[in-house]
Image (tube, rainbow, N blue to C red):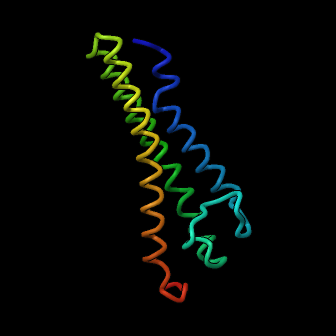
Amino acid sequence: MIKTDYIFGPQLLGIIFFLIGLIMYKFPPKKINKWYGYRTDSSMKNQQTWDEANRYSALLMAKTGLIVIVIGIAITTIVNCLISSEQMRTGLLLGLHIFSGLVPVVIVLTKTESHLDNTFNKNNEIH
């Protein structure tokens, strides 16, 4: 098995997601800004949507990061054990890196936007 696959594999992206989620949860942005926090049109409508979007997305990001770590270790182990061709193994792991970088972002965005839609009405008041 190749040790660098475990260091630089999708698990690293999972660790980054997890740490960013924890940092955002422990130190949420206090005011709407364009530099730090979950920044979408729906989250920046008012302070209430901003606070809720940042709270929800931080927890979701940390959870998603943990899932990516576990799945990344499992898949990296399977690929390294079953694929003997270094070129094929490298290609599969590269695809896994791309997939593990995109999927968590899509999950966090879609679930947080859905949460905001379900939590606030058209007047941005809590249901």
| Vertical side of 117 occupied by 40: above or below | above
Determine which quarter of the picture holds residue 33: bottom right
Residue at position x 43%, y 13% in the image = 2
| Vertical side of 77 occupied by 71: above or below | below
Q: Nearer the viewer, residue 2 or 40?
A: 40
Tag count:
0
Residue at position x 26%, y 16% in the image = 82
| Vertical side of 66 occupied by 76: above or below | above
Q: Nearer the viewer, residue 11 or 43?
A: 43
Determine which quarter of the picture holds residue 88: top left
Q: Nearer the viewer, residue 84 or 95?
A: 95
Residue 116 horizontal/vertical position (percent): 49, 73
Task: Find the residue positioned furthest to the bottom.
Answer: 123
Residue 117 horizontal/vertical position (percent): 45, 76
Determine which quarter of the picture holds residue 45: bottom right
Residue at position x 47%, y 68% in the image = 113
Q: Quadrant of the N terminus?
A: top left
Residue 65 horizontal/vertical position (percent): 49, 44
Residue 126 horizontal/vertical position (percent): 52, 84
| Vertical side of 36 occupied by 117: above or below | below
Judge left or right: residue 65 versus residue 80.
right
